[in-house]
Image: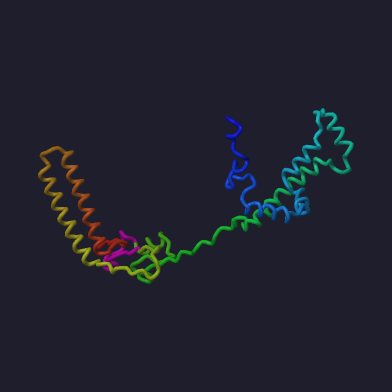
Amino acid sequence: MAEGEMVSGDGWVSDESSFYGDDDEQEHQLNLCDNFNPKSCWSTDHKDLNAVLRAAKAQQPSMVLSKETISFARQSSSGGLSTTADKLSAFSTLDRKTMEQERLLRLGKRERDTTPEPQTKVELVNPRQGHFDSWQLGESVDDFVNRLHPLSTSALTCPWIWVENPHRKPGAICASPQVEHFTNLGLDLLEHSLQTRQEMQGKGSRGAKGTLTKLLDIESKALQQCIADLAAEDQVLSGKVSCS
């Protein structure tokens, strides 16, 4: 290229890509230089981990010492001051915890509290507390069964034995159980199922026994489902009828 075709130095580097930055950046850096205080830097330099390791490394000999030499050096310095490397090593170990605590304080953080949170006391609720035919809060299973045994308690004394769920929310509205409707309709379901089973046994006496067993099992499961649905509909979910 001819010499006349070369561009001048002005404009080779734009203002946006200046090595020194724009005017605001230069002013900011100059302010930092003016306000820099080397005394504060040197006052905390001994706490810097790199400075501690650098000083400890400088104390290490350039050649590998034998075990005998190291043992002799330790014996000769026993009872006196420890070596500089030992002091720096102990200082580094103790000072790391202080540095970490200072760093957490600067960040506004605190050590995590390991104290377990107090557990909220669960309040047990029994809507039928005080009723003779119901389990009572604080009553053990053995005491309750001995007091109202399902096999020995007469229906004339206690038609229904109740065990309410004590883990309900306080003040929860519970629908009144329709015990009489459930009992009457439940007995009708039992009677109808019994008649169905008798008919199956009469017709299946001449057939395969396995087929009859399968049909009876289906009828039993159907009866159980019908009674469970009826109990949910009549809100009879926590009791057992006693013997007549």
Assess whether residue 157 is covered by the magenta stretch: yes
Identify the main secondary structure in magenta: loop
Compared with 63, 214 (above or below) is below
Left or right of 56 in this view: 23:
left
**x 84%, y 32%: residue:** 71
Q: Is residue 230 magenta?
A: no
Q: Is residue 149 left or right of residue 52?
A: left
Nearer to us in this view, 238 or 64: 64
> Which residue appears farthest toward the front when viewing the image?
4
Percent x, y of residue 162: 33, 64
**In the figure, 174 relative to 15: above or below?**
below
Of 139 and 14, which appears nearest the observer? 14
Q: Residue at x 78, y 40 (%)?
A: 56
Q: Depth check: 7 or 71 in front?
A: 7
Residue at point 28%, 63% (across, down) = 236
Where on the picture, by quarter, is residue 114? bottom right
Residue 102 located left or right of residue 172? right
| Residue at x 19%, y 60% (from the top left corner) | 187
Image spot of residue 137 (x, y percent): 42, 66
Q: Is residue 60 above or below residue 237?
A: above
Quadrant in which the C terminus is drawn = bottom left
Q: Position of residue 227 (x, y in %)?
A: 23, 57
* The N terminus - image quarter: top right
Which segment did they paint magenta? 149-163
